[in-house]
Amino acid sequence: MLKQSYFSIAAMFLLLAVSGYSQDNDSIVIRSIFSEALKDNTAEKNLEYLCKKIGGRLCGSPQAEKAVNWSEETLKKMGLDTVYRQELKVRHWVRGEKESAVVQSKSNGNHDLHVCAIGGSIGTGEKGISARVIEVKEFEELQVLGKKNIEGKIVFFNHPADPTFYYTFNAYGGTAKFRVFGATQAARFGAAAVIVRSATLAHDDFPHTGVMHYADTVKQIPAIAVSTNDADLLSGMLAKDPSLKLTIRTICREEPEAVSYNVIGQLKGTEHPEEVIAFGGHIDSWDIGEGAHDDGAGVVQTIEVLRIFKALGIRPKHTLRVVVFMDEEMDQRGAKRYAQSVKDAAPGTDKHIAAIETDRGGFTPTGFSIDATDQEVGKIQSWKKLLLPYGLYNLEKGGSGVDIRDLKPFGVPLIALVTDSQRYFDYQHAASDTFDKVSPRELQLGSASIAALVYLIDKSELKWRSW
Amino acid sequence: MLKQSYFSIAAMFLLLAVSGYSQDNDSIVIRSIFSEALKDNTAEKNLEYLCKKIGGRLCGSPQAEKAVNWSEETLKKMGLDTVYRQELKVRHWVRGEKESAVVQSKSNGNHDLHVCAIGGSIGTGEKGISARVIEVKEFEELQVLGKKNIEGKIVFFNHPADPTFYYTFNAYGGTAKFRVFGATQAARFGAAAVIVRSATLAHDDFPHTGVMHYADTVKQIPAIAVSTNDADLLSGMLAKDPSLKLTIRTICREEPEAVSYNVIGQLKGTEHPEEVIAFGGHIDSWDIGEGAHDDGAGVVQTIEVLRIFKALGIRPKHTLRVVVFMDEEMDQRGAKRYAQSVKDAAPGTDKHIAAIETDRGGFTPTGFSIDATDQEVGKIQSWKKLLLPYGLYNLEKGGSGVDIRDLKPFGVPLIALVTDSQRYFDYQHAASDTFDKVSPRELQLGSASIAALVYLIDKSELKWRSW
């Protein structure tokens, strides 16, 4: 008994000494990861290329095709062990001519609003739609107003995003639903079209697009987004003149589905090549901006993770894989295609010990949101001391992201890079999401944060649970 | 014994219950502080006025005078208990005509560099200074080169800021010293002038000014700052053609000292009106930008703290005082004047229980740096749970700021708002420090963070130690 106690204490001290050494060593490696990221401009140049040479990359578009080619070439130039594509079919929605929305008011004359068609919407036809406008703030009001007040009119969803949340993503659900489901909800009451206040906290002139969905059983009507400033303006004009008319014109349309690809590059693990740590962002973006924060940033950050490992000469024990996802914005077909490939892999291969997504903008990272077991979350939280010097204070259980969520049935720990969210919705899905809005340092802190986490997971061998 | 134990346990439970209630209550108040800040645009409008209607506010300038008047009027309109000025004398350095620096190289022709005079520098005279250039990265090189290589030349301090620090202020000391002391160090070896690489981590075309100091015993020579892009360019040209000539021309000069003011506004404490919680930023700024992040943000944030208290109907127990400091950039005369007023106050009055400075840009706050006793630091750290939901994870002992540091001899706990520093030096002291670079949400998180801390200090009565 006594002997065992002594042994335990000795073992404990040994363990402490080893783990102390190990944490010191880890902190040196992580420091070098951050230094490498902060002094290098490869990711910045990659993002500049995506934004300025290619531009908005809506799935199915020629720009998206160029971006796929660019991704493959870029990964091939890096001297990775494997680079390949995963073919998939994507929707091909085309915006057409610049949209317009003109208010015709007896008291205020004509006024052009800043608008854009919402992604996936049908067009109005060449002649456009002219109708009276009925403003609502909530879906529930439609029921109260009923068909008699709504039929033939343009429903104006004017629900401002709630500015009082610290984390702006918490306000998004409350506004995005009007963009996604507004047309269908209004069509049930005979509306001719909908115009939706942009889901941003900023007060400016940029309309924000994004995806919307029709229901099979409800008539499809056109949907456009209006800038927050012009939503306020329209609301004010309606208060003075409820009979004003709005003429909207959108020429958007759905083309036949197109062939597209996820692009994958990897460094083979030295000890467990069959076990994979996957990380990625999405290469498609909305067409009206440059897809800088959403999500060019995520793509170049995760490519950068592999560059950092190579630059520092860190050979991973597990296979490190960057996944450049296609079609996050419209239908998440790339995510589904990737999950299917994991499911279809030969037994004993392609076992994912973690999947990391970065799709919350190239802003200063604040930590990781972890969708995993308490034990896995606890393991990541045990690294807090190593991550805190880089502002990564936030290591909580929570949601991850739509490009990796389909791996959940396979028991993969899912992790999202969390960023400072204050400016994210200023740019998301708008023409203002451009390269100059990304701080190279903030972008690279994201790259380094993911690389540091990948390094720690690779070392610690988070246990992968078979499905 | 037993009885006492029971009593202790009962007391402990009572205490826990009370403190539990109290923390809940505090969290509700802090939530309402943040909500009030995030939904209101007063601070944004104030900053817009300072930046767009007044502009750069160098001490001694007409703009600085306007800004003093604006500060007083703004505070008076708020219905505070007291608003007053503190008179002081300030330097009045004037930039004069736009500066120029032209490289004349046999191999590369002529080339204009993006430059600006460094604050406090003498001018070159109308004709300018033409001389060969000698590039150094460190002060130590001057000694090695000696008078024979330096005399009559323009010394080019080309020390890039170290990008590998997470917290960018840690890189600043390593570069700012060339701006502050470069002219004097080079003049010791007979240099004709100095041109200094801007103390920013960004690679762009903005020269960054800032203050420099001459030594009484060393000849004064002109000092100009050059953008980082042009520092790289000049360095490259020198490598090809070491005999190239540089002609610099600056018309800056020192005018007689001017009268100026700190402006103070306060809400009187209900229980301890003689005890003060002071908070402020500086109203002066460099002349070439709008002084948006540095430090218009700090001024409007601390004015906003009082607006929030009034809007929420929180009557403080101690006197809450906003101090709009003059002359942080040049000589910190406002800071000295304020400290003197605290020292000169009648016994038993104007006792400071805390002083808070915000001068690290209107970026997302990450916490507070606390220059105080371990006990006081511990007290603030005990509020971590209340502050963490707003990203304030960083509550460490550390430096505060130059506008409050003169209160240190009086034993006042000094506190600086710490912000995400990644973009700060992109704009500091440059023409790019403009209103549009400030995110209204990030700005208001700073206001609310200070208000929350002031609320907690006011409640807890951090003990003020008499000097």
Image: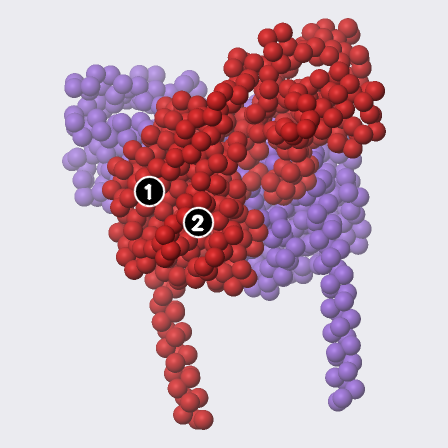
Chain colours: A purple, B red
Instruction: Answer with the quarter of the image where residue B103 lies.
Output: top right
B448 and A206: which is toward the camera: B448
A77 and B427: which is toward the camera: B427
Real-space Cα distance between discs 2 and 1?
19 Å
> Residue under circle 1?
B265
Characterize the local packing of mark 1: few (<14), some (14-19) or many (20 or more) Cα atoms within 10 angstroms.
many
To which chain does the residue with label 2 belong? Answer: B
Residue at 40% x, 92% y is: B3
For residue B326, above or below residue A287: below
User: Residue A205 at x, y = what percent?
Assistant: 37, 26
Instruction: Answer with the quarter of the image where residue A183 lies.
Output: top left
Query: Is residue B217 visible to us here?
Result: yes
User: Residue A325 at x, y = what percent?
Assistant: 59, 38
Horizontal side of A228 relative to A448 (left or right) equals left
Horizontal side of B319 relative to A375 (left or right) equals left
Residue at 71% x, 24% y is: B187
